[in-house]
Image (cartoon, rainbow, N blue to C red):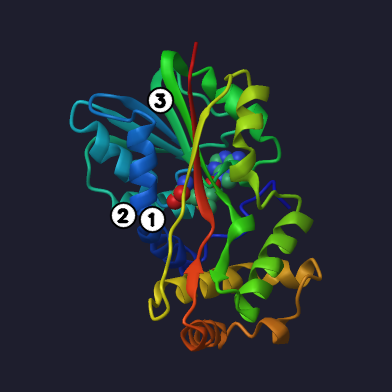
């Protein structure tokens, strides 16, 4: 299951990724800057998808720096190329398990990609090998285990259980973000700095229900295949409205998964 990207790349999925990317932009920018991504750097973006992180990094490194975004999905790379007009970005098709550039990089970054790889330690170790001594390896992953509403509401609680349950049964780790430290140590990168950035969406903010409904729609085949939930139970056609109503009636704040950043310098 986790040898391919579990959520696919249909047009609807690409649109969902773009909305998710806009939601994640503030946290991503904060973590990338804090990890030391800055002007003049040459950066590799693993599992670049539609290129959102690559574009943010291109802005941070400026015209004297450059970014290479690698992904194995040609449709995502085609979308990334359409969305990009910065001259300092190159997109390359490749499997991050074994793809390697002949050049070395000042930094390797990857957002929401290690969770999709069967051996994230091997991926980190492999790409740490393309970072110059003193360069930085940065991983950004979700810790989904704390996603909730405050106060708790039934559908949001059930949705988190469905999503985490299906991801687990598919052999992936919904709490991977929290465990990045162990992966870095096992990959020989030492003890990383780790910081989680948490979004909050007050009742009435449409973005929380939209994100949750989009994830449920994309994961529906997996929810059903893993036996975590049935199609009727999830009711994707109405789930966004039901979450929105539930949060509004309870005056509840929607708390999405935490985006955890881990980074370490190569000795
Ligand atoms: C959730 S998307 C994240 C995209 C992007 N990093 C972002 O944060 O917006 C995961 C991406 O990783 C890619 N991916 C997963 N496993 C891969 C592998 N082994 N080699 C290359 N790309 C991979 C998928 O094709 C997909 O585009």
Q: Is residue 238 above or below residue 27?
A: below
Query: Which residue is located at x 25 percent, y 31 percent?
Result: 61
Q: Where does residue 54 sit, x and y in percent of width and height?
A: 36, 42
The residue to which callout 2 is attached is: 82
- Residue in front for this viewpoint, 251 or 193: 251
Q: Where does residue 65 sit, x and y in percent of width and height?
A: 25, 27
- Circles 1 and 3: CB distance less than 8 Å? no
Cα distance in 3D space between marks 3 and 2: 25 Å
Q: Secondary structure at mark 2?
A: helix
- Do we see residue 49 in this rendering? no
Q: Where does residue 107 sit, x and y in percent of width and height?
A: 40, 25
Query: Which residue is located at x 70 percent, y 40 percent?
Result: 118
The residue to which callout 1 is attached is: 79
- Circles 3 and 2: CB distance less than 8 Å? no
Q: Where does residue 125 sit, x and y in percent of width and height?
A: 60, 23
Q: Is residue 161 above or below residue 123?
A: below
Task: Give left or right: position of 158 versus 25.
Answer: right
Task: Give left or right: position of 226 versus 198.
Answer: right
The residue to which callout 3 is attached is: 107
């Amino acid at each position: 299951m986790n040898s391919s990207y579990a959520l696919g790349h249909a047009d609807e999925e690409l649109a969902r990724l773009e909305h998710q990317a806009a939601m994640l932009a503030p946290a991503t920018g904060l973590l990338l800057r804090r990890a030391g991504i800055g002007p003049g750097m040459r950066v590799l973006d693993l599992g670049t998808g539609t290129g959102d992180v690559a574009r943010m990094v291109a802005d941070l490194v400026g015209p004297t720096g450059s970014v290479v975004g690698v992904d194995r999905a040609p449709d995502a790379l085609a979308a990334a190329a359409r969305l990009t007009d910065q001259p300092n970005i190159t997109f390359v098709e490749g499997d991050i398990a074994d793809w390697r550039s002949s050049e070395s990089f000042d930094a390797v970054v990857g957002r929401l990609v290690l969770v999709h790889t069967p051996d994230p330690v091997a991926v980190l170790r492999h790409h740490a090998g393309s970072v110059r001594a003193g360069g930085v390896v940065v991983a950004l992953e979700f810790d989904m285990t704390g996603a909730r509403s405050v106060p708790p509401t039934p559908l949001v609680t059930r949705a988190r259980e469905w999503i985490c349950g299906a991801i687990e049964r598919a052999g992936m780790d919904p709490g991977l973000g929290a465990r990045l430290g162990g992966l870095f140590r096992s990959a020989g990168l030492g003890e990383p700095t780790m910081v989680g950035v948490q979004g909050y969406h007050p009742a009435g903010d449409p973005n929380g229900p939209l994100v949750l409904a989009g994830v449920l729609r994309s994961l529906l085949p997996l929810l059903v295949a893993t036996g975590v939930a049935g199609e009727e139970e999830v009711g994707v056609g109405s789930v966004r409205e039901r979450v929105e109503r539930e949060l509004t009636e309870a005056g509840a704040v929607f708390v999405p998964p935490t985006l955890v950043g881990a980074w370490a310098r190569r000795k």
